[in-house]
Image (spheres, rainbow, N blue to C red):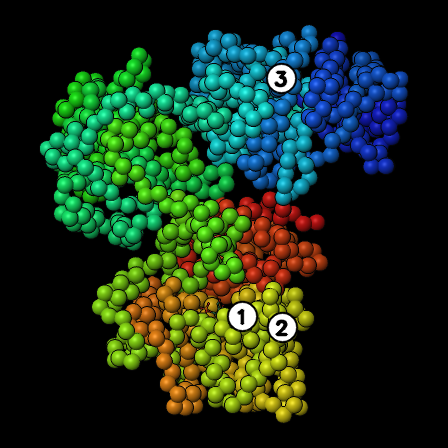
Amino acid sequence: MAQHLYSQLQITKDEAHTLSEKFFGITGTATPLPGEVDFNFKIKTSEGNSFILKVSRPGMDYQYFDFQLKILLHLADTAPEITVPKIILNKDGYPNSTFNDHFGEVRLVRMLSWIEGRLWSSVHPIHNKLLYDLGKSGGKITFALQSFQHPFAKRNFEWDIDQALWIENYVHLFDTDKNIIVTHFLKKFVAQKKQLDLLRKSVIHNDTNDNNILVNNSPDHPEVLSIIDFGDAIYTSTINDLAVCIAYAIMEKPDPLAAAVQVVKGYHEKFVLLDAELNMLHLLVAMRLIISVTKSARNKLAEPNNEYLLISEKPAWEVLRLWLKVDEHLAYYSFRYACGMNPHPDQEMFNLWAKDHPFGIADLFPTTGIKEASHIDMSVGSTWLGHRTDFTDNDWMAYKIREWTKKHPETMVSNGYLETRPFYSTNAYRKEGNHGPLYRTVHLGVDFWLDGHTPLHAPMDGEVFSIFDNDQDKDYGPTIILLHEYGPEKVFFTLYGHLSKSTLHTVSIGQTISKGQHIGYLGKANENGNWSPHLHFQIILDMLGNRHDFPGVAFPSEIDIWKSICPDPNLFLRQKVLHPKEGKNQTDIIQYRSKHLGKSLSLSYAEPLHIVRGDGAWLIDKTGRRYLDTVNNVAHVGHEHPRIVKAGQAQMALLNTNTRYLHESINEFAEALLATLPPELCVIHYVNSGSEANELALRMAYTYTGQKDMMAIEVGYHGNTNACIGVSSYKFDGKGGKGKPKETHLIPLPDAYRGIYRGEDCGPKYAAHAETILHQLASEGKKPAGFIHESIISCGGQIVLPKGFLQKVYHSIRTAGGLCIADEVQTGCGRVGSHWWAFEQHGVVPDIVTIGKPIGNGHPLAAVVCTRAVADSFANGMEFFNTFGGNPVSCAIGQEVLKVVREEGLMENAKIIGNNILSGLNMLQSEFSIIGDVRGSGLFLGFELTDNNLMPLEKQTSYLANRMRTLGILMSTDGPDHNVLKIKPPMVFNRENADELISRLRQVFKEDTMKVG
Ligand SMILES: Cc1ncc(COP(=O)(O)O)c(C=O)c1O
């Protein structure tokens, strides 16, 4: 047969159409599909039925087609629950048809049924469940093919991993870094080929790549429908099928091992895997990828037009680079874990041995004479650790530990095994997982807190495996690792970290050590990363290729694997207190809440958060995972701002009473607050919450005017008291609401984007509704008590009031004798960037301003500021007493908040960063039409999701908030149609935070659920 070029063999759409009609009597439009060997077309008939037409290349072996045919028949016969394409017979009742092409070459034509779905490559995002589902689908096929045989199955085939040695002839095609990868795995493959030959063999699919996996069309609940195309099936090591499946499933995943584990888990459920197979799986995955890139490299030369050959080259190299960094033993242990085995195969044997060979604290530090441990909680939520600025202050920590030791002289401060620690919730311990960032926070050793230079002794016989000064590249001083034998060819290691420099000369590598031998000293603070002196002690069953050092902390998601590699030191030490305090688990907390807390208290997110620590713009959960917070405007100057914490702590230590006594801070805070407001607003009443502030403001208005009718804005929210609910359409018009009280009168939500009037000039039109209401009241012989409003309507969906609206309404109300109340509970204290108070953006001065959330930075503090006239009329003889309002602690905190806003330039920051976010959102809006409107001011922003007809998209909004939470960013949703995402972060939100927010939003906007027609 003559050699023809790929382009000369190609079948046109017209030819496909004709072949379909001629052989199968099926008339339809033909669309080309990818295929390495065959030329494939989708044939769609006018009745909406679809088929797949496959035209062979010339000179193919008929056995090959028979092989594929028989596989499909076998699966249909033995495993009808597996969805695979059905064979469509030609007009004569046969599966195969032939014709001669323009070269006179015989070409074979087949037709299969079409399975409606989408390709794996088009699914975004790919969740763990889908990977697991893929594993199950692959495992089912492997299982069903165990009983299948065919003479063609045993053939030479370059895609067969068992036959991968052909690659040796092509290593020269790769340049340096690619060459290193290929050579690395090839060498291992050659070395382990004999083991591979001993593994189970069977016919396998051998090509579960992302263009052969069909997924259903549901964007929210994707499931694997079918694995198609048995053209690469072969008789080989059975485990290769899983290796192939993993090789493609881990592409474009930042954490390929985590993705692979899910596939293995699903696969093992349907086809039980053996330990020897799991042991080779990491290498076999690499070899499949290497086959792929080698074929691409070679075929690039031979068939430059065949794009299919190049499709998977780039991601294959990317994943190979990542896969090379995955320790093969760690992969093996992870795969064992996925199959329900102990991750480390020797775990049980070691545990038994360790229990028979106990040693005590006194064996490690005989000079101290201490035998017992006492535990200090150093977990993420530890109140003993306190503020970040406390636990990163070495002198302070050393002092606290000394004080503890004085009180517990017979014990040694010890802690840490599997403790989730806050020290590691930083970028240095962060990696990008497949579902957002992960932090390596779980401690794998125990710590013993002692004086610097305490002598350290070996607790058992061993040999010095390594001694190394980690100060050079990491900040924690010299480390000794001892090797111990515990059975024939069974060893484990003990690691001693944070030692003194002098230890480097105490022992040497290879030296035999006997139990009780002095091996070094604890480092002083300046020798061990500036920590208070302590020993980090860890047991390691497998050094995972490390020589001088070993990870001392692990990712919470991998902890079951790591605790098998680094067993519990308490197996030897038997000190119960070394274990972290067992907190309540998430389910228990939720269950208790649902039983004993009011059902109307809600929890955010489909998967609720258990936050135990705050730090600036971040919230940190129990596992040490950090979440960037765009929700909590209450933590105005940052979560647990050290100055606010100190101000509260300091005053609380002295006195906390009430406003019936004289106290400087009550006046000083008043003075500082009034300085931010227009001079007309000059009298303060302190309260404890926004609701209380608005309750009081309403009372003042009623008292001042002697009237009861109040005007408010549709979808406004002003608090949870009776009177506040009465003016909060968000509540009385919402779920469980009883409708508008007769004294409340609503102006329609002045939404310039989707409201009843739209566009820039709609302000006066909305304001005219106030006039109408006042006329109506007048016609009933009534006057208004006042008008209550926010200046950017928060619950209404961050609605920025249109130009001219407030001025006009204020004028109307005042003309009718009413008061104007500006609710600054959400928007105040510089949040809008341009002014201290949002009403100032509209050139109005209210009669009463209510201030809440931000002023206490999380402490319950609120205030009502009004004009002298209003205050005087309110002081009608009845005392206004508020037990907690204006107590010295609250005032000290409020005063410090105002100082921090000024001294850290946070209003200016809100303006700059707010504008950065706005321009980022505007850019996203030009990329994704689902973003209907972007609005807001400073760090009080919002964007709205709508379809092309401006219809609100609630489902997508909720999806976006939940996905962002998964990816490590907290967002909240609101608006009458629940389609607005609100952005109102702590005011310390910086440029890096803003960039992260925009880039994560972009990531989610690309996902399937966010696609609207
Ligand atoms: C605009 C506005 N006013 C008043 C309140 C009530 O404040 P608090 O919850 O502190 O009582 C809220 C609370 O969300 C609010 O958003």
Q: Is residue 288 left or right of residue 18?
A: left
Which of the two discs, 3 and 2, labels the residue nearer the N terminus? 3
Foreground mark, 1 or 2, reads: 2
Identify the secondary structure beneath mark 3: strand
Q: Amino acid at mark 1?
A: Tyr
Quadrant including the N terminus: top right
For the image, the number of numbered tags is 3
**From mark 1 to mark 3, how far is it between C-alphas?**
63 Å
* Residue 436 vs residue 43, the one in the foreground: 436
Residue at left 86%, top 28%? 26
Q: Is residue 355 left or right of residue 594?
A: left
**Is residue 480 positioned above or below 731 on the image?**
above
Residue at left 42%, top 70%? 689
Q: Amino acid at mark 2?
A: Gly
Residue at left 35%, top 38%? 442
Q: Which residue is mark 1?
A: 717
Per the rendering, the mark at residue 739 is 2
Res 546 visible: yes
Q: Is residue 43 left or right of residue 1005?
A: right
**From mark 3 to mark 2, how far is it between C-alphas?**
66 Å
Residue at left 56%, top 90%? 815
Which of the two discs, 1 and 2, labels the residue nearer the N terminus? 1
Q: Which residue is mark 3?
A: 204
Q: Amino acid at mark 3?
A: Ile
List x then y, in percent, for residue 542: 34, 23
Residue at mark 1: C-beta within 8 A of ligand 1: yes
List x then y, in percent, for residue 991: 43, 54
